[in-house]
Image (cartoon, rainbow, N blue to C red):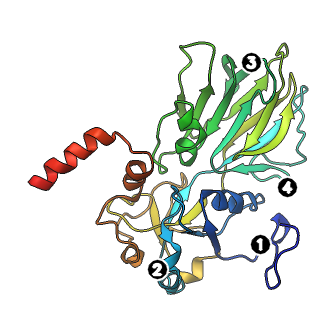
Amino acid sequence: MTDPPEGLEHWSPQSVTPIDLVVTLGGDGTILRASSLFRRGRIPPVLSFSMGSLGFLLPFHIDSFPKVLARIFAGEATTMERMRLGCTFLDAEEQRTDGGEDIACGLEGWQVMNEVTLHRGRSAHLNRIDAYVDGTHLTEAVSDGLIVATPTGSTAYSLSSGGPIVHPSVRTILLTPICPRSLSFRPLLLPGTSEIQLRVHKDSRAPAEVSMDGQEARTLHPGESVKIRVSRWPVPCVARWSPSASSRVTVPPQDLALPVVGVDASGLMDDPTSHSPLSQLDETDGEDEWVRDINTLLQFNAAFRNKALLRHAQL
């Protein structure tokens, strides 16, 4: 976006400090774009409206925006914290090459909401990537690449590569291989406290292209690496209430510009009784939003689920 239409301002990472609420219109990609603008620190609550496309991060349809915004400004906002990953790049001498000072908040550091992907790009050769967890060598991956994903990203590229579906409230990091040569290389779920380092093997015949939330970031040559860990700044997404909203909190209007209250140090737990009337705006018949999404968007276990629904309807 180089020349914004008259009346619109083009915001950048250098001008995000005074923002209290982010509103996105479109698909899941608009939320990833909003997340990428907040690299320096806290990101304000994100309110997302679907423009007709389906997605896991779109709780409201655009037709309901007047009622939703009215509820928001009345202080009836419920958010779900979605984990991000903080990344830093290192050269072959383990020196930082991204110009930042901290892995999770450097000025030029990377914050990703879905996944970090190392892949062979246009090369005809497989990547050789050494994977380390908390400084310990885990494995040498000979494959088309590796994906390090958040629970939110578990339903994106990682899922297409055979990774598991993970509830967004689970604090974990996914490590998923892309077309590995070894059939015994299975996806892993690692603790959210882990630090993962992926280094291109010194004898690799191909460099590794790095993608961050689907956007090409840079190329890693043999000996170079990227370190990844959970960011201290998750994305608070405004969500509908559901009976299992164990990772959601109610945000009063005066706190919209502050970190979400009611969350412990892990960023996962809150008072499950803090529910918002926003659920009245987009009815889900009491069905959990995430359960609805994996069944609607992914057709999760569809044949057996349909039979189960018929049985329950007959009771």
Residue under label 4, please give it.
Answer: 107
Q: What x and y, as percent, mark residue 41?
A: 73, 61
Question: Of label 1 and label 3, which has the lower sequence position?
Answer: 1
- For the residue pair 285 and 101, the one nearer the viewer reads as 285
Query: For the residues marked 2 and 3, what is the alpha-carbon distance in whole angstroms?
Result: 51 Å
Nearest to the eye among marks 4 and 3: give it: 3
Query: For the residues marked 4 and 2, what is the alpha-carbon distance in whole angstroms?
Result: 33 Å
Q: Amino acid at mark 1?
A: Thr
Question: Of label 4 and label 2, which has the lower sequence position?
Answer: 2
Residue at the image position 85 percent from the left and 48 percent from the top? 101
Residues at circles 1 and 3 in contact by the CB criterion of under 8 Å: no
Q: What x and y, as percent, mark residue 45?
A: 60, 69
Residue farthest toward the front in the current orientation of the protein = 52
Residue at the image position 66 percent from the left and 56 percent from the top? 32
Question: Of label 4 and label 3, which has the lower sequence position?
Answer: 4
Residues at circles 4 and 1 in contact by the CB criterion of under 8 Å: no
Residue under label 1, please give it.
Answer: 17
Question: Of label 2 and label 3, which has the lower sequence position?
Answer: 2
Q: Amino acid at mark 4?
A: Leu
Residues at circles 4 and 2 in contact by the CB criterion of under 8 Å: no
Image height of 113 relative to 286, above or below = above
Residue under label 3, please give it.
Answer: 126
Residue under label 2, please give it.
Answer: 76
Task: Determine whether the residue tagged by mark 3 lies in a helix, strand or loop.
Answer: loop
Q: Quadrant of the N terminus?
A: bottom right
Other-residue count near label 3 (Cα within 10 Å), few / some / many at <14 / 14–19 / ≥20: many
Residue at the image position 74 percent from the left and 18 percent from the top? 126
Other-residue count near label 1 (Cα within 10 Å), few / some / many at <14 / 14–19 / ≥20: some
